[in-house]
């Protein structure tokens, strides 16, 4: 006589086997890979994870996994937990319209019959046409797609893209686009937003990712700042130190020494009338030599986007005027 079968709950089901075979997911970095410190800071404006001790950038282009809304108690959190995507200025309709997905499946996940796919294709086509109904929306759709392409190529954070989209929308409202290329106005808006959000990028960096030359971007930027009355302070050499040191893989002591040199140079007005990237590159070169973590002028010049001659000229000015002792 056969024994009674075991209850189905005792045997491992397919879900249990799937959990057992699932690989372990590792979390974000908790210690610095350079100095081993556990004092890490998340910079949500730049999308970076930075070590407080040595200044090393452990992660960049981080994605904010949190909600797009604020809740001040548990009840508000439960009410808003199933809200849709947030409105954004980087989409021509601000993300308020719907879009028919490209997958040929119904809400239950079943495949749509072949006889109905032609109708679904027509619905998608008319949905795209309805979303862009006039010339202004067509302009915005093309321009914001170009803005997103340039910003993605430069790994710029979200707040810079939103600010650039706002500047471009103001230019469209005041009819500043007429007679100028859309790509040029987009590049100029992105350059202005980088300065406004304290994430400075040079004109050469933006020109390398766009299809517009450096001169046209600068000319369009000056015109837009005058017409839109954008109050932007000039970039400082200190704004480039952290990024250049991170790309050169330098320690925090080198970065601190470079900032000290620039502080002395600013007090004696040695930075006025000079390009900020060249002065920042010379200060980094001097700090690397003084700290014993030497980098060549060519390496620093490639990261800063300047020539070696510029670094040598700024190097001589800083060492002579500040009486810095550098053992070459």
Image (cartoon, rainbow, N blue to C red):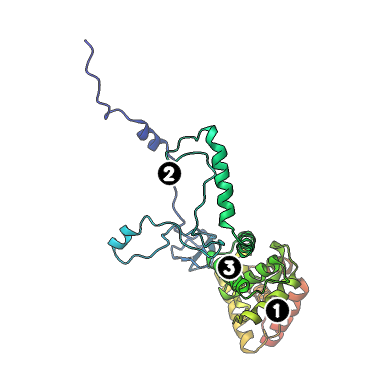
277 relative to 31 in the view: left or right = right
- Name the residue nearer the viewer: 110 or 113: 113
Give the Cα distance between marks 3 and 1: 28 Å
Q: Quadrant of the N terminus?
A: top left
**205, above or below 226, in the image:** above
Give the Cα distance between marks 3 and 2: 40 Å
Mark 3 or mark 2: which is in front?
Answer: 3
Mark yes or no: residue 272 visible.
yes
Mark 3 or mark 1: which is in front?
Answer: 3
- Name the residue nearer the viewer: 31 or 77: 77
- Check disc 2 and report its element: helix, strand or loop: loop
Mark 2 or mark 1: which is in front?
Answer: 1
- Check disc 1 and report its element: helix, strand or loop: loop
Q: Quadrant of the C terminus?
A: bottom right
Q: Position of residue 316 (x, y in %)?
A: 74, 81
* Label whose residue precedes the other's in the sequence (3 or 2): 2
Which image quadrant is residue 78 in? Answer: bottom left
* Label whose residue precedes the other's in the sequence (2 or 1): 2
Give the Cα distance between marks 2 and 1: 49 Å
Q: Position of residue 176 (x, y in %)?
A: 67, 74
Q: Which residue is mark 1?
A: 275
Instruction: Point out which mark residue 165 bears.
Output: 3
Q: Position of residue 4 (x, y in %)?
A: 22, 18
- Check disc 3 and report its element: helix, strand or loop: helix
> Residue at coordinates 55% horizontally, 46% vertically from top-left?
123
Q: Which residue is mark 2?
A: 24
Q: Residue furthest bottom?
A: 268
Mark yes or no: residue 294 visible.
no
- Name the residue nearer the viewer: 280 or 48: 48
Instruction: Point out which mark residue 9 bears.
Output: none
């Amino acid at each position: 006589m056969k024994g009674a079968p075991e209850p189905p709950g005792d045997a491992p089901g397919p879900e249990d086997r799937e959990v057992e075979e699932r690989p372990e997911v590792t979390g974000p970095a908790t210690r610095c890979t350079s100095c081993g410190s556990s004092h890490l800071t998340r910079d949500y404006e730049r999308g970076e994870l930075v070590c407080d001790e040595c200044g090393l950038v452990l992660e960049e282009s981080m994605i904010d996994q949190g909600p797009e809304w604020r809740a001040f108690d548990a009840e508000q959190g439960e009410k808003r937990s199933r809200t849709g995507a947030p409105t954004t200025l980087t989409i021509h309709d601000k993300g308020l319209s719907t879009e028919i997905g490209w997958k040929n499946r119904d809400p239950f996940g079943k495949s749509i019959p072949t006889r109905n796919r032609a109708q679904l294709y027509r619905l998608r086509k008319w949905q795209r046409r309805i979303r862009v109904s006039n010339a202004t929306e067509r302009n915005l759709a093309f321009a914001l797609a170009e803005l997103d392409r340039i910003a993605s190529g430069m790994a710029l954070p979200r707040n810079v893209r939103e600010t650039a989209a706002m500047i471009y929308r103001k230019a469209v409202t005041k009819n500043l686009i007429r007679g100028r290329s859309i790509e040029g106005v987009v590049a100029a808006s992105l350059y202005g937003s980088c300065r406004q959000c304290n994430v400075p990028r040079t004109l050469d960096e933006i020109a390398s990712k766009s299809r517009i030359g450096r001169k046209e971007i600068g000319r369009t930027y000056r015109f837009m700042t005058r017409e839109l009355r954008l109050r932007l302070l000039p970039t400082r050499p200190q704004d480039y130190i952290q990024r250049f040191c991170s790309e050169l893989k330098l320690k925090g002591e080198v970065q601190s020494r470079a900032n000290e040199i620039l502080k002395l140079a600013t007090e004696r007005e040695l930075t006025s009338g000079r390009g900020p990237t060249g002065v920042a590159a010379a200060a980094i070169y001097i700090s690397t030599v003084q700290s014993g973590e030497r980098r060549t002028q060519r390496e620093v010049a490639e990261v800063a986007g300047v020539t070696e001659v510029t670094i040598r000229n700024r190097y001589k000015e800083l060492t002579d005027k500040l009486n810095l002792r550098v053992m070459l």
